[in-house]
Amino acid sequence: MSETLPVRLHGKPIGELLLSGTLRSPEDWQFTYDGNAAEVATLGLSLSLPVRPEPYYGAVVRNWFANLLPEGRIKESVASRLRISPSDDFALLAAIGGECAGAVSIGTTTGTPAEDETDLETLFYLAGDGSVDGQWALAGAPHRLSLAGAQDKLAVVRETDGRLRLPNTDELSTHILKPDSRSLRGLRELEALGLRLARHVGLHVIDCELVSVAGRQALLLARYDRAGTSEGAATRLHQEDLCQALGYPSEMKYQSQGGPTLAKCAALIRTKAVMGPRASQHFLNWTVYSALIGNADAHGKNLAILHGRQGDLRLAPFYDLVPTIAFSEREIERTPALDIGNAQRIDQVEAADWDVFARQAGFAPRLVRRRVQELAEQIIGVLPAVLAELEQEGADAALLERRALQPITDNAQRMLERLAKR
């Protein structure tokens, strides 16, 4: 017995995903490219699944495609609503894989019933008080919208008048909407701070906006995997995160779980993908900035590669930049998601750890130390102004000042003092 799902890229057929057997285990997955796949995209779907005539089998297939799905409690809520086992990734892709990250579509388009509600205010009013984990992701399930990650989120269209709604059939979403977390209070403000601060220190990062939908605070994020046409319409950009590009499942996005290392990520960027010095600098900026703001959750799915149709590659703008140091250790531990040298805590990275990172990742230690110093000084200098800016836009200023201002400043200042002793 076998099941098949057509896979499209940029709206064009590129291959077929197949599951055989009754156990539905990773070994039962198979993906085969169509004969003209290279005409759709020179490199195919992934650096871990380059175009070839022979089929791909097993975990490398399951890992790449399952990385397109939600994770954790959000995945469980969506699966429960659809009466699908949360371990049945193939069935979940068939149910909600119509619009995934980037330019991938999985399964047969069934169309959204014309009577389905798309206005978010109305939709959430009808859904109730929002106390269910994954409520916003659930709202996108009937429209076959799948967004990877452990946070509740929803792909939406932003109208010219600012109104937010679900996309209609065959319409692309333009933004991602994240409600403030019910388990990690203040996550909305802190993620906005991480993103806005990165922009103020000159890093390439997605746009974000603080909004309220149906009485609930949320963060609206511009999709980096979308581009505008001359006619003003949105078009898809293909992307994959570093776990996908390296062949890791989402369950191994942390190094402590057997996942990628910073050295492996750097080698992928520098040698396998051959993206050039600009991409290497972008990767260095991501690593250093995440450490300085105390982001212990900078894992393998939080950096992505954008694929051009002719095989050109570049790193995506930064996203999911949260100073997790602002949360208590009962909520989020301090262990870095990807090891920086021998540091055991994100707030205890030493100058010597940067030297170890530099050697492992192929950077000159002096270059790394200089970049750490530059970004630390910039962060300390602009952080108060960024907090004031977000307060003007409706952020909880007291929360940011109480939980983020001093920890981030102290962490950056400590790093400058360690560098000065070298």
Image (cartoon, rainbow, N blue to C red):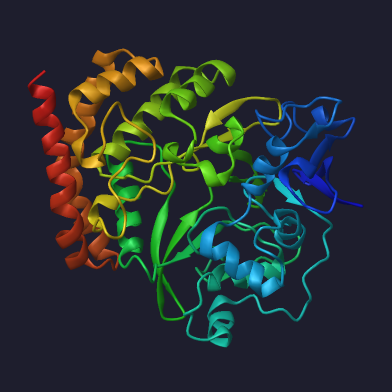
Visible residue check, residue 155: no
Question: Between residues 140 and 12, which one lies in front from this camera angle?
Answer: 140
Residue 57: give x, y in percent of width and height.
Answer: 78, 35
Q: In the image, residue 349 lies at what x, y percent?
A: 22, 33
Q: Position of residue 25 (x, y in %)?
A: 74, 48
Does residue 89 appear in this view?
yes
Residue at image position (51%, 23%) is 269
Is 183 positioned to the left or the right of 372 in the image? right
Q: What residue do we see at 74% from left, 57% from top?
A: 98
Relative vertical location of residue 257 with respect to residue 279 in this rendering, above or below = below
Along the viewing direction, whichever of 240 and 261 lies nearer the viewer: 261
Give above or below for 264 relative to 201. Answer: above
Image location (x, y in percent) of residue 348: 19, 37
User: Which residue is at a point 75% across and 65% down the rendered structure image?
Assistant: 169
Q: Which of 348 and 407 lies nearest the eye of the viewer?
A: 348
Number of numbered markers: 0
Residue positioned most to the front = 23
**Residue 306, picture quadrant:** top right
Q: Quadrant of the C terminus?
A: top left
Q: Residue at x 74, y 43 (%)?
A: 10
Decide if residue 145 is on the left or right side of residue 11: left
299 left or right of 365 in image: right
- Rendered view: 132 above or below 291: below
Query: Is 177 situated above or below 5?
Result: below
